[in-house]
Image: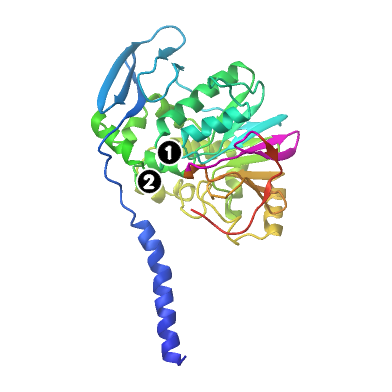
Amino acid sequence: MPLRARSAAARLILAGLVLVPLLAAAREIPAPAEHVDADGPYVFMTSKGHQAQWVCNDHVVERDLPARGAGTVVLPECGYPHPLTVAAPQLASTAQYPATPRIVAVSDIHGQYGLLVKLLRAHHVMDNDDHWSLGSATLVVAGDVFDRGPQVTEAFWLLYSLQQQAAAAGGAVHFVLGNHETMVLYDDLRYVNPKYLKSAQLLGRSYPALYGADSVIGQWLRTRPVMLQIGDTLFLHGGIAPQNLDLVRGLDATNTLYQASVGLPKDQVKAAPDTARLFDGKTSPIWFRGYFDGQMATDQVDALLKNLDLKRIVVGHTSMPHVSSFHGGRIIAIDSSIKNGENGELLFIEDGAVSRGLLDGSRVPLAEGKMGLED
């Protein structure tokens, strides 16, 4: 090929490489759905207690719930199928805990409530009535309940309820914020299921306002951590870039800064000196993918973990066909593509031994990860 032709071809390839991310960035907010069969409840705090709202067959149902005793009970209308107890507003708690004998972890649910229920029942995390049945064990959810799928509301209420039930049984449920939680709450709605834009119209609020600070789930989200350490394992949605080791060393301060930033305008948090790197789309803890795309070799990952005195880092965000081990088990990827609505897996860490739980209830070794990315 003549030099001029090769140069022209190179320019075309380069233009294509530039155009693809530009097209991805230009993704538009979807149009609202024409119909909502069932959604809710959305529960808001009022001066007299709570108000619950549902959308049932395009009809808005409202119920005022005066405060009584320790919690407010919300009986189902449509959407989430179980009665739930609204507890007092939660305070942000520490995100550093001692080692525990049994941890189960999952991530990137993305509105696939039915698949989540099937997976948790199959491994007796909860019983067939969707009540916590894992005793003193710990469940970690590494972010991204929002967006894509059709049952976001139900998934949030299930995790909220399991957290209460686990605490009563001596166990724990930890929810770690993902990039899609921050995106929705700062009004980036490109990946929202059209159903929810229709619900917001019918309820007379913007979609982020359905999770405002005056809502029960919105308040709950604003007190969740971005990074969680249990023993020698760090859980987070994206990952820790080498330049961000100080964010882990000051874990509580980092979580506090994230929590104070949730729901602030996107441009503000991305520009402010104290929060810009927390929301950076490539290197921040909620976005980093460098363990899987060749940015970091295994010796670099090993040095990072030794520097932080960790045995492993468990992350979601980067979709895999299976719960997978990378860099000699130092990194475990738990986004098992539940978002596709077809399959999903759990990670088990039991007295330091790791395995993955399949949808049929069986347990097998972790898959060996293959380098490469999927959004």
Residue underneath mark 1: 146
Residue 21 at x, y = what percent?
A: 41, 62
Question: Does residue 86 show up magenta in the picture?
Answer: no
Residue 240 at x, y = what percent?
A: 59, 49
Residue 318 at x, y = what percent?
A: 54, 50
Mark 1: amino acid: Phe
Q: Which of marks 1 and 2 is nearer the N terminus?
A: 1
Q: Is mark 2 on a helix, strand or loop?
A: loop
Which residues make up the magenta segment? 341-361
Image position of 122 (left or right of 58): right
Q: Going 45% across and 26% down the picture, which residue do you hit? A: 157
Question: Does residue 343 show up magenta in the picture?
Answer: yes
Residue underneath mark 2: 191
Dot 1 and dot 2 residues touching (CB under 8 Å): yes
> How was this image coloured?
rainbow
Residue at the far front in the pictured view: 360
